[in-house]
Amino acid sequence: MKISFSFLAFIFLSHFMMAQKGKLWRSEASQQFSNYEQLTIFHDKNKRFATVKIIDKVGVLRSETNFKDELKHGFEKVFYTDGSLYWKSDYRSDIANGIFMVYYPDGSLKRKEKYRNGYKKEGFCYDTLGSISTYYPFKTEPIFGEGAYSIQRYFRDKWPSSLKSDISGWTMLEMNLLIGKDSLARISHFKIESLEYQHILLNAVQNMPKWKPGTFDGQVNVTAYKVSLILTSDGLYLSELMRPQGNPLNSPIMRNGNNGRRF
């Protein structure tokens, strides 16, 4: 009996010391933005593991996401404005892996999908009564014409012939578009030094035919779309058509515009 008590005491002391050590490693950082607060909780002294919480101005938790080495790793939860759960998902190194579930505001199940290494293995949608309904993607991207080649062809046609020669090397032309619910594209940001090039692309976008807008949870949504063009002596190219493509079936989960460093 004495040996058993000593062993239990040792186990308790070990857990207590580990817990205290964990507390010493735990740290927090808060950033205030115009309409929300970002609270980052680091779980180790090297700051490899963290939980990021987004809290709105009235104090409601709107999302909670786990990270490892600045990539989504573990569960993510997103909440409605009243604090009820909107969806929950699971990631491994920024790739959807596991069960993705979406809920109606009343808490009933709206969608259930299963992912493995970023690929959707199965998916179901449900109506408010709990019956299986017609499946639709959680998120769709805007589409112009037939896709990437249509974008490249459009900007090539709009590029002035007087600027199609005497180009040395190559120049990257980047712009962020917003595809509205009205299917029209608008420029939200340029990453182009030449004012002349900016003016050409601005006119091209203003005269661009309508897109097929993106959707989010079944509703037409204003969607950001990045266009990267490369100007060379051989012509104008869409950058994604000049290099091998990665896995196009990444997670459909909204990233809130944060694909890089989150904390």
Image (cartoon, rainbow, N blue to C red):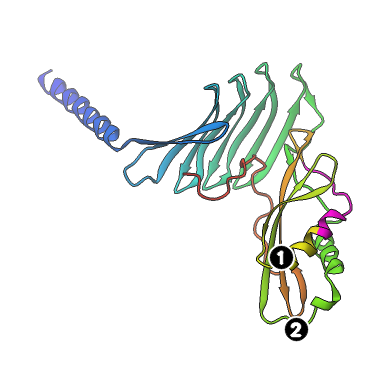
Considering the numbered disc 2 on the image, is that residue within a helix, a strand or a loop? loop
The residue labelled by disc 2 is 166
260 above or below 43? below
Q: Which mark is residue 195?
A: 1
Considering the numbered disc 1 on the image, is that residue within a helix, a strand or a loop? helix
- Where residue 133 sits, quadrant-wise, is top right
Q: Name the residue rendered at 30%, 38% in the picture.
A: 25
Q: Does residue 238 show up? A: no
Residue furthest to the left in view is: 2
**Considering depth in this image, is 181 or 43 the residue closer to the camera?**
181
In contact (CB < 8 Å): disc 2 and disc 1: no
Q: Which mark is residue 97?
A: none
- Where residue 8 sits, quadrant-wise, is top left
155 above or below 26? below
**Considering depth in this image, is 257 or 66 the residue closer to the camera?**
257
Q: Residue 142: give x, y in percent of width and height.
A: 78, 47
Q: Residues within 10 Å of mark 1 (few under 14, many from 20)?
A: few
**Left/right of residue 34 with respect to residue 134 in the rendered view:** left
Q: Report if residue 121 lies within the magenta region.
A: no
- Where residue 105 sits, quadrant-wise, is top right
Q: Name the residue rendered at 58%, 31% in the picture.
A: 35
Q: Residue 12: give x, y in percent of width and height.
A: 21, 25
Mark 2 to mark 1: distance in Å? 18 Å
Earlier sequence position, callout 2 versus callout 1: 2
Instruction: Specify the segment rendered in magenta.
Output: 203-214
**Considering depth in this image, is 48 or 187 the residue closer to the camera?**
187
Query: Disc 2 residue type?
Result: Asp
Q: Residue 89: give x, y in percent of width and height.
A: 58, 34
Q: Residue 137: give x, y in percent of width and height.
A: 75, 38
